[in-house]
Amino acid sequence: MEKKKDVLTTGQVAKICNVAPRTVSKWFDSGQLRGYRIPGSKDRRIPLSQLVRFMRAHGIPLNGLDGGTMRVLLVDNEEERNNLIKEALEKDGRYEVRTAECGFDAGLIAEQFHPHVIFMDIMLEDINPQRICHVIRETSELQSTRIIAITSALTEGEGQALLQQGFDDYLCKPFDIQQLIQCVDESLSIVH
């Protein structure tokens, strides 16, 4: 199976958006589509998260993007909830979902799956939230991965503490699938 790319060339973006490569270069050069240049070269690279943000902002259908799927990893020891969420997200058609019931399994899956978003129950026994955020941010293939904490009710101060530890957002239990989907969509549209 071909590994899904998290950073794309202007040619790949052009194919996904069904436009000429020169159009993508203009988007990039005008600052509409964010990315970076390869050092010592004029070649442009666009992170997948930035392309998704751009496509959504400009009403470009995501169906050219790996079938339009975003990779989501759910880390929670409640198997029944994992299965319900996985089924609901996959039924939506835009998401490819993997689940893990402990931190160790989550690490193995994340290394191979390269999720765009990780939802992590921070109350699991083997989870050190601050350490996990640090490891993910230090792993080059996962640096653009959005990390969402799942937990019981939080005070505003506890929520801010999670954000300071490296989480991109948090979701309080109980939540419904629409809240989770909204959280995924908002996470992927945020400009890094």
Image: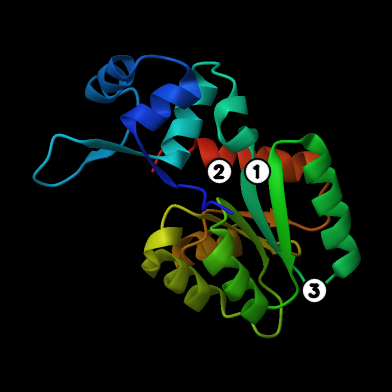
**In the drawing, does residue 167 fall left or right of residue 148?**
left
In the image, what residue occupies the spot 43% across and 52% down? 144
Left or right placement of residue 23 versus residue 104 in this view: left
Residue at (69, 48) in percent of width and height: 96
Determine which residue is flagged by label 3. 77
Q: Nearer the viewer, residue 152 or 67?
A: 67
Q: Earlier in the sequence, mark 3 or mark 2?
A: 3
Q: Residue at x 45, y 60 (%)?
A: 142
Measuring from the top left, give residue 108's x and y in whole percent: 59, 74
Residue at 73% x, 46% y: name it.
Answer: 180
Q: Considering depth in this image, is 165 or 49 the residue closer to the camera?
A: 49
Task: Give the amino acid type for the residue marked by disc 3 in the picture.
Answer: Asn
Q: Are marks 1 and 3 in contact (CB under 8 Å)?
A: no
Labelled disc at residue 183 = 1
Badge 1 amino acid: Cys
Asked if residue 155 shows in the view, the reply is no
The percent position of residue 123, horizontal first and vertical second, equals 71, 75
- Count neighbours of disc 3 (C-alpha within 10 A) and say few if under 14, some if 14 to 19, many if 20 or more: some
